[in-house]
Image (cartoon, rainbow, N blue to C red):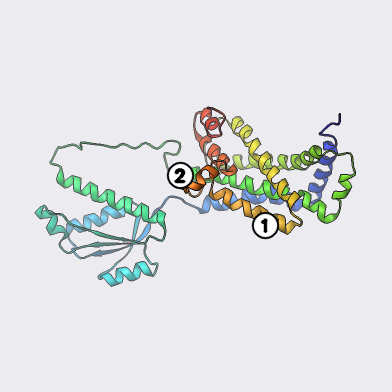
Amino acid sequence: MRNPFQGIGAVIYKEVIHIQRDSTAIVFALMIPILQMTILGFGIDTNIRQIKTVIMDDDNKKLSRELVDRLRNTDTYNVVKYVYSDREMNEAIIGGKARVGIKIPWDYSDRLLKGETAQVMVLIDGSDSSVAGQAINVTTAIGLDESLKRVLTTGQTLPVEVRPKVLFNPDSRSPNFFLPGLTAVLLLSVTTFLTAFAIVKEKEKGTLEQLFVTPVQPMGLLLGKILPYFAIGFTELCIILLALVNIFRVPIHGSVILLLLLSMPYLFVSLSFGTLISTKARSQAEAMQMAFLTFLPSIFFSGYIFPGRPCLCRSTSSACLCRRRTSSTSHAESSCAERVCGTCGLTG
């Protein structure tokens, strides 16, 4: 009976020589992801702060100025200009000079002193749903707090008090949320693209036929093509984790060994997927196009960028490779390693 892994050592040796000769592949695999992580890690802030806001205060009395001060102190609004007409407010939002316009009517203070309801109009640019949602939440919370202060008598406590507690990322730091998921994206892109050209290069050079006449078995050929790039991908993962902890101060309270072990199947499947693309493509340009065709859906359906998905796509996205890796990496910040196992489907 033939050994299914016959010739794997020779193929690995041959592929290592090719990698050593192609220095650009090593730079692409090790240096480019770190450069991308550095740029994105320091350049992207997922927390919404300092939204450009214009104020139209027709009342301009003590109570209205106190309301404006409360809006300023939230750090959500950045008052860039005071306007004096509805037309100026609309032009500021339409022209992109402001995202939010707040109009305080002339009878705001008088209504509050009389015990009547005072209305404040908040005009929000809804082109960015994240900014719009944050603006709505903050203004609604301030309005509710102001109302409760006036409705409740002195010394009376709130009938219901909600005390939120944020787990895993209590300071709401963007790197703690953004970079663990970015690790999965970088690993997916690098490993898939590395092996997407592995066999198609043999086709273009005409050396694939030479491999067919050798005693190398199909399993030995595939594993011999994958394993050298698996070592590169695992090295890249270790470098990224070191950068996460030492440069961006992203804590990993769980077991690092367990995280590395759970990352191995992810790397292997990504490399195998790239090898599948390489066997179907007829040129390196076609392999790149096929890799991009599957790369973007894997990211968008993973829940890393957009948590909401249509009902039709939920069952498909639950099997998404990048989704599995993103979930396990994000939960690696937990102090309990069992949470990581449960995310990756290793526990019941």
Marks 2 and 1: CB-CB under 8 Å? no
Three-letter residue code for mark 2:
Arg
- Left/right placement of residue 256 relative to residue 70 reads right
Task: Say few, some or many: other residues with alpha carbon within 10 Å of mark 2 (under 14 / 14 to 19 / 20 or more).
Answer: some
Q: Which picture quadrant has residue 240?
A: top right
What percent of the width, then of the height, locates residue 214?
90, 42
What percent of the width, then of the height, locates residue 290?
67, 54
**For the view shown, which residue lies furthest in the front direction?**
312
- Left/right placement of residue 164 relative to residue 160 reads right
- Taking depth in this image into account, of 97 and 10 the one nearest to the observer is 10
Q: Which mark is residue 230?
A: none
| Cα distance in 3D space between marks 2 and 1 | 35 Å
What percent of the width, then of the height, locates residue 106?
17, 64
Quickly name the residue at label 1. 289
- Tell me the mark number nearer the camera, choosing from 2 and 1: 1
Say if residue 248 shows up in the picture.
no
Three-letter residue code for mark 1:
Gln
Q: Is residue 74 above or below residue 9?
A: below
Task: Say few, some or many: other residues with alpha carbon within 10 Å of mark 1 (under 14 / 14 to 19 / 20 or more).
Answer: few
Q: Secondary structure at mark 1?
A: helix
Quickly name the residue at label 2. 173
Q: How many numbered badges does the structure rendering display?
A: 2
